[in-house]
Image (tube, rainbow, N blue to C red):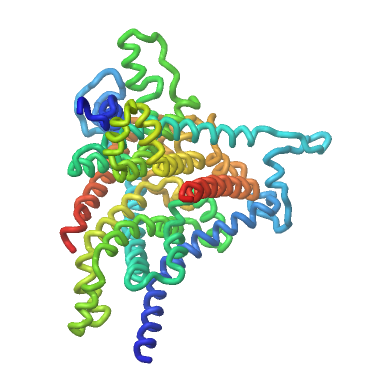
Amino acid sequence: MLNKLKQLQDQHIRGGLISPSMFMIGFFLVIPILIVLVYSFLESGTYGGVEWTFSLDAYKQFFFEEDFLTEELVFNSAYIEIFSRSFLQACTATFLCLLIGFPTAYFIATRPLKTQSLWLFAITIPYWVNLLVRTIAMLFIIRDQGPINEFLMYLNWIDTPFKLAYTPFAVSLGLFYSFLPFMVLPLYAALSRFDMSMLTAAHDLYASRWAALRYVLIPSVSHGIAAGCLLVFIPSLGAFIAPDILGGGKQLMIGNLIALQFQGSRNWPFGSATAIILLSIILITLYIFSLRKKGEQK
Amino acid sequence: MKYAINEYPGTKSITLLCMFILYTPLLVISLYSFNSLRSITTWGEFTFDWYIKAFNNPAIQDATMNSLLIAVLASSIATIIALAAAMGLLRGAPLKRQKLVVGMINLPLLLPEIVVAVATLIFFIAIDMTLGLGTVLIAHIVFCIPFAYLPISTRLKDIKQGFDEAAYDLYASRWQSFIHVTLPMAMPGIMSGLMLAFVVSLDDFIIANMVAGPGSSTLPMTIYSMLRIGLTPEINAISTLLLLISIMFVTASWWVNRSPKSAS
């Protein structure tokens, strides 16, 4: 009996210890997200804010706009373009990260144990530096009067500055630079658990290096590759800073579109609907990957 | 064996390229913050002028104070909350809703920052809270919790519960056992979490930009508005300072928490 009472008291204390974190995140994050969901089904107020009438206008606005003269709905591809641009940018960034990140993670995983943590630490440091500062640093070196262009002109390879800043590629480059550490870490985690003697075994069975890579190494670490790609793809899709600063306001992505609705155009329901669509895309992506993982385990 | 099969040619050079890509922009911007000339091509002389100029800018002074105040408060409060949560979750058998609770704690990491930013903004407006430093502080505490929780929970998992039981056997109360046994052993994880939370709070631009009212700009917000005029050497100077602070804190955080096995 006493033991049971003690257990009950124990449960209460543990519940009490957990509750502040649940309150902070529940009240100031989960409820706000639910409000976004509700607002996405309301009408936009004349002076910002919302009108409390149910409407699907915010979602319709994605595909159609009202013709001023005829008041008919006409197809509008502007927002779909922003979404496909974001998707393309996120894919490019993920691909570039994988291209550089995989060999890097492999190199680190094959170092002596002692030096591995130092290499990893060197990879993570830039992640902790202010993202705005890192993006500004990137703009600084790729802009027309930046060191890269000055150097190429000094070598007389080019006469006029090579236009890099404020192009779509600059945004990809910025996203790649922002999230590269996210690719290396899970890849390293997977590679360091991989038994390297498997490669020797493959070699003994007359596999070439590339065959061993293709048929032994990559399939064994595919979960690490998937995790790394997700960790780069998801934040890239909702990025705000890189397209804003490196795209010079001309390369809008989903994140910028959302921010605009709350700062400039003041269409809260449309902004909320955009945020909900972004969240849905992320959830669907995660769901597909979790299905794949389950399929692998079977 | 004729050659090591697990040595792939080129991985070393790609790793060095990776390091080069990661660090060059940061080094270049730091270097040019000391150039007395605004030019990229010509190096005038080594100078601290841009730093002095930035320090004398009242907008930067205010923003620095705001940023430091919020980072200190948000990281301390988030660390206490995360420590409590870790103690509740990791001492004793797993709770019934363990997974859900851990998922909630990590939720701020999963959501895109811009979505968190606008959601927090409309929430504060809906409950009629005046936008200012207070709203920035609340938003920062929320997303600092998972960053503080991570090293603390890793550390606590490494401390065997036998220590607590030994303390109870010696008639220590739950609180005494926490203060004299668990807390000192978990300290490296707590310090590491505190410093990571501090850096994360100092780094934030997107969320502060949405929920800070007029007159309560943080340092990244001030840098952003200065950028509208153009990339000036003052921005380089402030950016260099911010990046040095982040690197210092993260290195310290890594250092205090580097060998969890040796202490327990």
| Relative depth, front residue between B256 and A40 | B256
From this view, report whether residue A267 is shown above or below residue B53: below
Direction from residue B4 to residue B83 in the image, left or right: right
Using the rendered view, name the quadrant where residue A33 is placed: bottom right
x and y percentages locating residue B172 in the rendered image: 21, 82
| Relative depth, front residue between A274 and B37 | A274
Q: Residue at x 21, y 57 (%)?
A: B260
Q: Residue at x 28, y 39 (%)?
A: A196
x and y percentages locating residue A62 in the rendered image: 67, 40
From this view, report whether residue A111 is shown above or below residue B102: above
| Relative depth, front residue between B88 and B264 | B264
Direction from residue A101 to residue B139 in the image, left or right: right
| Relative depth, front residue between B87 and B158 | B158
Residue that extends furthest to the left in the rendered view of this protein: B262
User: Quick check: can you spot residue B28?
Assistant: no
x and y percentages locating residue A125 in the rendered image: 28, 42
x and y percentages locating residue A137 in the rendered image: 35, 32
